[in-house]
Amino acid sequence: MSPRDATAADFPAILALNEAFVSVLSPLDEMRLARLHAQAALHRVIERDGRIDAFLLALREGADYDSPNYRWFAQRYSRFLYVDRIVVAADSHARGAGTRLYRDVCAWALQDAVPTIGCEFDIEPPNPASERFHARLGFREVGRQSLHGGRKIVSLQVLDVVTDNTA
């Protein structure tokens, strides 16, 4: 269960995982996924028994990405790796796939001398599982943002790669 690079052949499984958790993610269709994949610094999956159990998609600064959360980080950090989404299949939550994916991200960031990893999770409506998971890894809140006319509020989080020891 080591992370590997995602390929276009993985897209149907990635889209199905994203759809299963769309209530706490932004929607994703094949065209948008292909565009994000092409720009991604990291797009990794974990496969178990021939099935994609988890995926992570991350972008560097300078990407042409219209996400308001990505743009928030781009306005405040000159060098960063933005985790746009990390999704783990519901029946695999206790198997450590999310932690393995973040270890992979941290190793990549260290190797490329990227000082900051950014992400966000919903606090309205709440996503307590993501909040606990990111806190355990050492992320800390650096801002909040209201989206969709106030129907959604996100906690903007960072992990300082050089000083933090994750997972």
Image (spheres, rainbow, N blue to C red):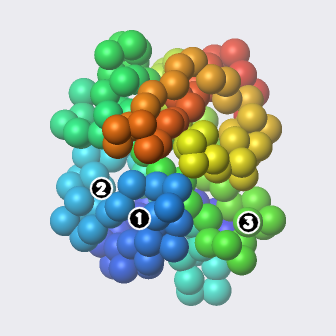
Label 1 secondary element:
loop
Marks 1/3 in contact by CB < 8 Å: the verdict is no
Residue 35: image x %, image y %?
A: 21, 55
Q: Which residue is mark 2?
A: 37
Judged left or right of residue 123, residue 132 is right
Task: Say which of 76 and 49 sits in front.
Answer: 76
Residue 7: image x %, image y %?
A: 35, 68
3 vs 2, front mark: 3
Amino acid found under the numbered disc labelled 3: His
| Cα separation between marks 1 and 2 | 8 Å
The quadrant of the image that shows the N terminus is bottom right
Task: Look at 55% across and 60% down and name the residue there.
Answer: 87
As displayed, is residue 143 above or below residue 138?
above
Q: Which residue is mark 3?
A: 93
Res 146 → quadrant: top left
Packing grade of label 1 (10 A; few <14, some 14-19, many >=20) is some
Amino acid found under the numbered disc labelled 1: Ala
Packing grade of label 2 (10 A; few <14, some 14-19, many >=20) is many
Marks 3/2 in contact by CB < 8 Å: the verdict is no
Q: Which residue is mark 1?
A: 6
Residue 75: image x %, image y %?
A: 32, 16
Earlier sequence position, callout 3 versus callout 2: 2
The quadrant of the image that shows the C terminus is top right
Earlier sequence position, callout 1 versus callout 2: 1
Task: Look at 51% across and 73% down and name the residue there.
Answer: 20
Amino acid found under the numbered disc labelled 2: His
Res 8 → quadrant: bottom left
Task: Look at 46% across and 55% down and name the residue there.
Answer: 25
Judged left or right of residue 97, residue 150 is left
As displayed, is residue 136 above or below residue 145?
below
Mark drawn on residue 56: none
1 vs 3, front mark: 3
